[in-house]
Amino acid sequence: MSDLAPPLTMTDTSVKVSPVRISERHVAGVLILALCAVLVLIIALPLWALLSKSLEDTQGRFIGLANFVSYATTPALLSSLTNSLLIASVTTGIVLPLAFLYAYGLRRSCIPGRGLFYAAAMVPVFAPSLLSGLALIYIFGNQGLLKSWMMGASLYGPVGIIAAEALYSFPHAVLILVTALGLSDGRLREAAEAMGTTRWRIFHTITLPGARYGVISAAFVVFTLVITDFGIPKVIGGQFSVLATDAYRQVVGQQNFPMGAVVGIILLVPAVLAFFVDRAVQRRQNAMLSARAVPYTPQPDKRRDLALLGFVTVTALAIIGPYAVAIWGSFVKYWPYNLSLTLNNYDFATVEPEGWTTYGNSLLLASLTAVIGTALIFTGAYLIEKVKLFPRLRAFAQFLAMLPMAVPGLVLGLGYVFFFNAGWNPLGVLYGTLTILVINTIAHFYTVGHITALTSLKQIDSEFESVSASLKVPFWSTFRRVTAPICLPAILDIAVYVFVNALTTVSAVIFLYGADTKLASIAIVHMDEAGAIASAAGMASVIMLTAISVKLAHVGLDRLVFGRLQRWRQR
């Protein structure tokens, strides 16, 4: 009988270990279910509420597609759609070649100061979109410094919207095109040059085809940004109606919620189409690169480099110049007749009842969104990527996590209005509070942070999880002690991205703020409506400088974290 003791002991041990593994599976299941529930609550249900509202009349009765028919047969409403398509198409046609040539100068030449020129192109990213409109008003408006350059035309309307949207969307196109031009295989160009192929032939047979998917992706991104933007048309559009301002007018001005929902659905269509095309384009772009690909390293060429240096210099000045003028104008007593400097324009309480409180609200919103949003985004990405349990639930969570990329901020904001304002919804108490602003902002910018987290997590060898499982270490311990420290640079990137966008956003929250939770970006809209252009420019400048400061601090902190992470890995 004693010979049977060891087997009994082994059986005993297995019985003791089993509950631990079952418990870990249960914890994983609960966490993934909770992630799905949160994403359904903050993303899917508001969009469903938007769709439902578009199929109802003002009394809440189901009427099918009658609202869409009414919209299509009302010339004044239909003109908003054609105007938006026109503005977005023209802006895309202007921005794309300029951004391509700018990115070409940064990637395919040996011009000095490429990092500085890249930083100059990114300046609009850190400012509310309204600031580009305000800046152009200072330069080309009715009292602008260069009004004569307009040759009698008015800035307030399609001309001003296109110019301001081009300024605002330019860096987004440059970001994509710089990456696309950096991914091409340099061996093709080197072979062509060795064979004596002309530069023009190399450009249109190698360079342009190699970056075509990036060009397509940039075109759709610019088109979507422009057609869904609210701030610029509101500031500089005058009586020229577009979809974004039409939605605002229907909901806020006329209290016609079903028609506002219809406009939201119409806005959603081009964004969804652009999203799926962009996904397909990115897959094709990645497929072009082989493991043997060699990055192209440009060689000095005096004529080419001088020409590109001149172009990027002029373009960078055209980007920075308007923002510099807007900042200057915010300190001027009476533009353009009395250019002496004053701080009176920064006494916001004289033109905005909440004064500097709106800036404090924006900082609080951005901080809470960065902390809570980063924790949710990174933890959710870890559950989806690294916890190899419940594949269907994880796939559903992945779908929900990618959904906000295809949803414009204005559309999401409308969905929140209809969902949280519904009489049956007990969460209606959140409407107008800082809580709903935080939730909405997290949902709005969820996808980019999620993709960033997934990219970082995919770079971590799966052996960490395998070894932890073999040692019976629960996944949450691995997450806390290994994964999170390794991914700290990516976590910081997500936090800064969310913070900056929460600070500058306006379209997603324009319907959701309350008397005590007005944000700085919304105060800018109200200041502009009141004719206080200098104060509006001042508040926008404060937001922009705050966002740039946070980014610069992030760069320094990122270097520190990277250095410590390297030392930690060496141990």
Image (cartoon, helix red, strand yellow):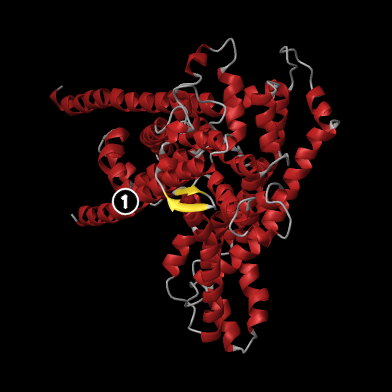
Q: Quadrant of the N terminus?
A: top left
Q: Position of residue 387 (x, y in %)?
A: 40, 36
Q: Residue furthest left?
A: 2
Q: Residue furthest front?
A: 338
Q: Give the residue drawn at x 66%, y 80%.
A: 200
Q: Give the residue drawn at x 79%, y 33%.
A: 77
Of residues 316 and 501, the one drawn nearer to the viewer in this rendering: 316
Q: Which residue is mark 1?
A: 553
Q: Quadrant of the C terminus?
A: bottom left
Quadrant of the image occupied by residue 12:
top left
Of residues 408 and 530, the one drawn nearer to the viewer in this rendering: 530
Q: Position of residue 472 (x, y in %)?
A: 26, 34
Q: Secondary structure at mark 1?
A: helix
Of residues 71 and 390, the one drawn nearer to the viewer in this rendering: 71
Q: Amino acid at mark 1?
A: Ala
Whether residue 129 is visible to the viewer of this picture, yes or no, is yes
Crowding near the residue tagged with mark 1, few <14, some 14–19, many ≥20 C-alpha atoms within 10 Å: few
